[in-house]
Image: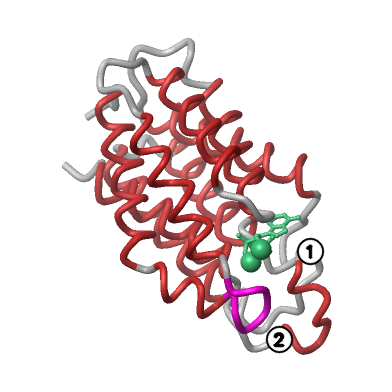
Amino acid sequence: MPLTAPDLHAWIRAFADRVAEERAYLTKLDSAIGDGDHGQNMNRGLSHAVDQIDDDASMSDTMRTVAMALISKTGGASGPLYGTLFMDAGKTTAEHEELGTPEVAALFRAGLNGVQRRGKAEPNDKTMVDALLPAVEALEDAAENGTPLSEAIQQAANAAKKGMEATTPLEARKGRASYLGERSKGHQDPGATSTYYLLDAAATAWSD
Ligand code: ADP
Ligand code: MG
Ligand code: MG
């Protein structure tokens, strides 16, 4: 079933709900290798984003509204990065009435490119990129194989989860965690964790 604007609204609400539920956990992860504010940052930005959603807005207008809300209210490194993700992802929706697997793959690819352009993180730097990149690759494989969206997005969420888990042994090379050097090893990255929630929220909101 292809996606229209209400499906994107449901996804963003599901992401905000998940972050609100896991706020303390995200903050605990960030206390180990950062400054202990990732849960609060994301929750503040996303509650504001949800308040700003207009049920009648188009897909691209919604994505831009969410991007602006995240940029203005999230704070930290994650605010501009998630803001850029939504801004760049949203631009790909402008030319479509509805989105199937190939369009959703393009949406997340554009979001990933935005995060990398802004933050300069490479794979295995122990960041959000480590959850987002495998999800994008899973979506692109699914698009090539003609996999229906509900299945493709579940595969992407599974790939994001694996990528998130794989950040634990890594040494951080970007953001505050990189100040710890070797001591960042043995802790799961908070941003990769919230990015897994982003994908898992889509899998929940877009299941048949
Ligand atoms: P801050 O570190 O400024 O307090 P947050 O705690 O909200 O910001 O977010 C931290 C997360 O941001 C990290 O766990 C990491 O995933 C992500 N991050 C930090 N710097 C970068 C970067 N340059 N590229 C991609 N992600 C990054
Ligand atoms: Mg922090
Ligand atoms: Mg901070």
Picture quarter with the C terminus: top left
Question: Earlier along the polypeptide chain: callout 1 or callout 2?
Answer: 1
Q: Name the residue under label 2.
A: 185
Residue depicted at x 56% and y 60%: 131
Q: Name the residue under label 1.
A: 174
Picture quarter with the N terminus: top left
User: Is ligand 1 closer than 8 angstroms to the Cβ of mark 2?
Assistant: no
Q: Is residue 176 left or right of residue 158?
A: right
Tell me the amino acid under the disc marked 1: Lys
Q: Is disc 1 surrounded by few (<14), some (14 to 19) or many (20+) residues within 10 Å?
A: some
Front in this rendered view, residue 59 or 130: 59
Which percent across, then down, holds residue 25?
43, 76
Tell me the amino acid under the disc marked 2: Lys
Within the image, what quadrant is residue 126 found in?
bottom right
Front in this rendered view, residue 111 or 49: 49
Question: Magenta part of the protein: which range?
Answer: 30-36
